[in-house]
Every structure is written in C-alpha cells, then in structure tokens.
Image (cartoon, rainbow, N blue to C red):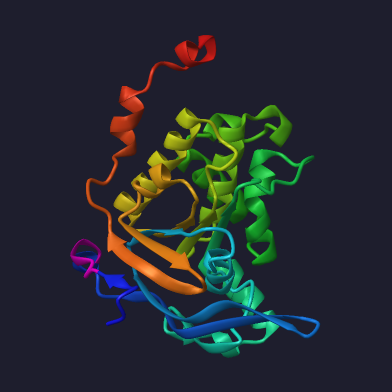
Amino acid sequence: MSSHVETIVHDEARAVTRDVVIRLERIHKIYRMGDIEVHALRGASLEIHRGEFVAIMGPSGSGKSTMMNIIGCLDRPTKGQYFLESVDVSTVDKAGLADIRNKNVGFVFQSFNLVPRTSALENVELPLIYAGVGSSERLRRARAALAEVGLADRERNMPNQLSGGQQQRVALARALVNNPSIILADEPTGALDTRTSVEVMEIFQRLNRERSLTLVIVTHEPDIAQYAKRIIQFRDGRIHRDVAVENRKDARQVLQQLPPEDDEDEA
C-alpha cells in the first residue's frame, strides 16, 4: 500500500449492510484547455456502502468537486468505470444520465438553488414534475418531504420569506422527494450560521440513522465533517486519506449545548 494513502476498514458502515451503492474504479478526469491538460483526478478508486454518511474534503484543486460531479452524474470520467447501484453509468448517454440523476440522486447545494417566485411546496414538487408523477401524488409526497424537514407550516412561503436555514431545508426536502439512493450535498452549510449549520446536520444524521439514507457531503469545514461516519480527503487528484470518524459529533447534543437563539442575536 502506498505510504501516502491511509485506509481503515469501516466496520460500523459495513455492519449496516454489504451493499455497495457507489463504486469508482481507477477514475481519471482530464480537462483540456487549449494545449494544456489539467489532471483533476488521477486514478481514484472508491466504494461507498448503503447507509454510509461520508464527508469529502480537500483543498481547492484537490479533485473533490470533480469527484462529486462524477458521482452525481453531472460529469463523465475521462478514463475508468463508475457503478451506481451496480449500473455502469460511465457509458450511459446524456438522456440516460439525466434520468439517473432524477431517480437515483438528490442534490443539495450551498446556494440552495430554489426557484425565486415559486412556493416552498412547488419547489419541492419540481423533481416529481420532471419524473411525470401525477398532481395528487406530487402534492402528497412534497408535503411529506417538507414535514420530514420540519417545514409543514411553511409550504406556501416563497424563498424570500424564509431564512437561510429554512431555504436549505426546502432544498433538502426537494432532494428527498424522489426517494433517491443517495443524497449529495455540496458545501450544504457554507452559507449558514453556526446554529443553523448544526440544525441541518441534525437532519442529515436523523435521515441517515432512521432511513439508512446514503449521504455524501463535500465540505471544507473540519467541524462539519465530524458529523459524518467517514472522511475521505483528496489531494492532487488522488485519495490521500480515508478514515472512519472517531469521536463523531451528535448534532442533537451539540444543539442542546448551544446558547438560545435570542442570546446569539444579542451577542
């Protein structure tokens, strides 16, 4: 084993299930800019099992965002194979990738990406419209998703009537509404304050615990990564370190220890 790679067997995650949801084999990604080649990924191999909660970290240019885009079927590897739910998606055409994204992957972004003049409920319904789900079923599932993230009473609010944390929860409900295999979250707490960040991580941990939902987040914040079960660090297009999280943070406990919101506002 190379000295620059540290691998630890993830006993806790593997005990949940042996199902591999994500498998990447010797993934390379090369971007060409004129005569210049940029090697964003250099033979990265990775497995993520059903029910894992993984944080991907690394400095700018390390390859973590490229890896996330490939996992989310937003980009293709230049070389190597990617299996999602045992399907080799590295050979699927654009229409097929769009279908896989809609059915198998839920996305949460730092900037929320909500439609401005559309209610919370209608934002959550959007993936179901693309999937051709009927109106009554769309309404039922969208309301259930909003209730799951604690926003049952905000379904008629427009994004500009919601706080940043509430907007992120709407985005999470939208990601959940199609019952995807995995949730991919790109810097999901990057635009949020401390308390709201922990509230979002509490929802992630609850979904992972109660639904065995597979979660993959990209974050530059070490504190946020400590809520995951496993941390994968990228450097120079390669996996530099892959470890189970010791002394994992419990978001519910952290919230209990934070000062009340009024106290924070006064500070």
* For residue 127, side relative to residue 266 (left or right): right
Q: What residue is at 49 percent from the left and 32 percent from the top?
A: 196
Instruction: Tell me residue 18's x, y (percent).
Output: 25, 75
Quarter location, residue 90: bottom right
Q: How far from the left and from the top, in percent, is residue 126?
A: 68, 55
Is 243 in the magenta?
no
Q: Which one is nearer the viewer's eye here, 145 or 61?
A: 61
Pick whichever, 46 or 164, lies toward us: 46
- Image check: 74 left or right of 251? right
For image coordinates 42% across by 44% down, the residue present is 224
Counting the numbered discs, the total is 0
As displayed, is residue 160 above or below residue 125? above
- Residue at 32% from the left image edge and 34% from the top image edge: 252
Q: Determine the residue positioned at 33% across, 66% down.
A: 242
Specify the farthest residue to the top: 266
Q: Is residue 162 above or below residue 215?
A: above
Residue 46 lies, with reference to residue 57, above or below; the image says below
Quadrant holding the N terminus: bottom left
* Front in this rendered view, residue 233 or 86: 233
x and y percent of residue 134 in the render? 65, 60
**Residue span colored magenta:** 8-13
Residue 48 visible in this rendered orientation of the protein: yes
Q: Is residue 140 visible?
A: no
Q: Position of residue 170 (x, y in %)?
A: 59, 42
